[in-house]
Amino acid sequence: MSGYIPTMGLEIHAELKTATKMFCTSRNDPDETRPNVNVCPVCMAFPGTLPVANREAIRHVLRVGSAIGGALADYTEFDRKNYFYPDLPKGYQISQYEYPLVSGGMLSGIAVTRVHLEEDTARSQHLSAHGGEGEEWSVIDFNRAGVPLMELVTEPVVHDAKTASAFARELQLLLRYLGAGEANMEKGQMRVEANISVSKDPATLGTKVEVKNLNSFRSVERAIAYEIERQVETLETGSLIVQETRGWDEAGQKTYSQRKKESSHDYRYFPEPDIPKFRLSRVAEFSAESIRAGFPELPWQKRDRYVENGLKIEDAEILVADDAYARVGDEILSSGLDRDGMRDAFNLLISEVRGLTPNEEQLSRLSGASLGEIVVMRREGSISSVAGKVIIKNLLEKGGNPADIAKNKAVLQVSDRDSLLAVVDQIISDNVAVVAEIKAGKEKAMKFLLGEAMKRTKGSGNPTELEKFFRERIGLT
């Protein structure tokens, strides 16, 4: 990039999981498909209505702040952020400006500036008649208007797209672990905005451009990478970067200009007169002790625990991101297997089980103890690796006990000399040419004979014993 240093700060909005909206009793239901059913005079901004703050939403934000090591506010207040847009029924948004709920903190190695609470806007849909031809028109669904929205702002300390995406993923995990929100980006429950600049001087930031409403981790990476390249190319041609807000065109894989970038004074913030100021220390449930009470194991704590027990970091990430796999993983850790046995059981979980793409119900039939039993059976030579796969498939489909499945499916490994010699002798008789190749020094041909033996024993023949008997009969020992 010709010596340019990209720098960005992130602003991430996440809808919170509460029964009702931020300032009224209308349902907060992200799965509602009927338009304008979860609305009331408050979230529709009827004259004379008064907002009342949602205690659970405040608690969610304080728990996030505590998890990242931020300073929880004692004094806090809500503000009016004034701007006019069709999806904002009041003509202003109730947000927080000077006194956020959380200040500072650290997540995924990135310094956090603040975490505050506000209300979401309605959802606009822009349509056109006659399948894209003719007059364009817009409709607004107010179900989302007033939904509790957490905004997290980072310091401008991110320097590449991968780091930005990793930060957003870690925040999504944190929200899910705390039960604060699902943060499903495809549903618009979490939106990422990146303030991007480039400069050749590491001590000076360039002109900031905001890229808004990135709704997938892939879009976060691609939009940031594109915008960095666009700004570098602009400066290299001798032009200046315009401070503006840009959107992301997923189809065209490029950013596009939306509007001139606003500054905080453009919004004419002032304290919300209809909501009292808060002294959180006077509310018992908002004390630091209460906020941390019942904290779950956090994503980075779980990740470290798995890695300390011998998992590769990429395998640990799979378990950290999925509760169903984490349950089985924790059962493996408590199964009593030695370290090598645990490693083998985790390999079965990550490779064999996950490779079958089981649904949640199927995965509920599997236990870490069952995988441990399969590992022990393989070590003892009572089943082969192929038989292990058969057992796993049956466990996912019907549940049960690995030993019983092995017996019922006739996959217990046969090591009996007389039984295996009968198979070996027949295969040698049927494959004279292959035997001749082996005698001539073509050792790889032995794999063919072993494959034939496993077919004829339906995977139950002990491969070690079979190879020993083949070598004995062919005269290689």
Image (spheres, rainbow, N blue to C red):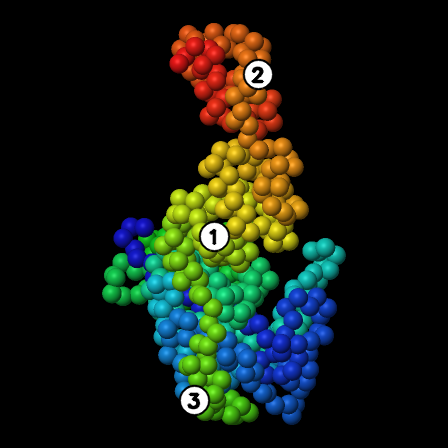
Nearest the viewer among 348 and 236 is 348
Q: Residues within 10 Å of mark 2 (few under 14, many from 20)?
A: few
Q: Which residue is mark 3?
A: 281
Percent x, y of residue 314: 42, 49
Q: Count the labels in the image.
A: 3
Of callouts 3 and 2, the N-terminal one: 3
Q: Which residue is mark 2?
A: 422
The numbered mark at residue 302 is none
Residue displayed at 48% across by 41% down: 376
Badge 1 amino acid: Ser
Percent x, y of residue 426: 58, 13
Along the horizontal axis of the image, is 202 left or right of 20? left
Q: Is residue 261 visible?
A: no
Nearest the viewer among 455 and 137 is 455
What distance separates the C-alpha of mark 1 from that of mark 3?
44 Å
| Local secondary structure at mark 1 | loop
Percent x, y of residue 105: 36, 72
Residue displayed at 41% across by 87% down: 74
Badge 3 amino acid: Ser
What distance separates the C-alpha of mark 2 from that of mark 1?
39 Å
Residue displayed at 32% across by 53% down: 236
Q: Nearer the viewer, mark 2 or mark 1?
A: 2
Q: Which residue is mark 1?
A: 335
Of callouts 2 and 1, the N-terminal one: 1
The answer to whether 277 is drawn above or below residue 317 in the figure is below
Badge 2 amino acid: Ala
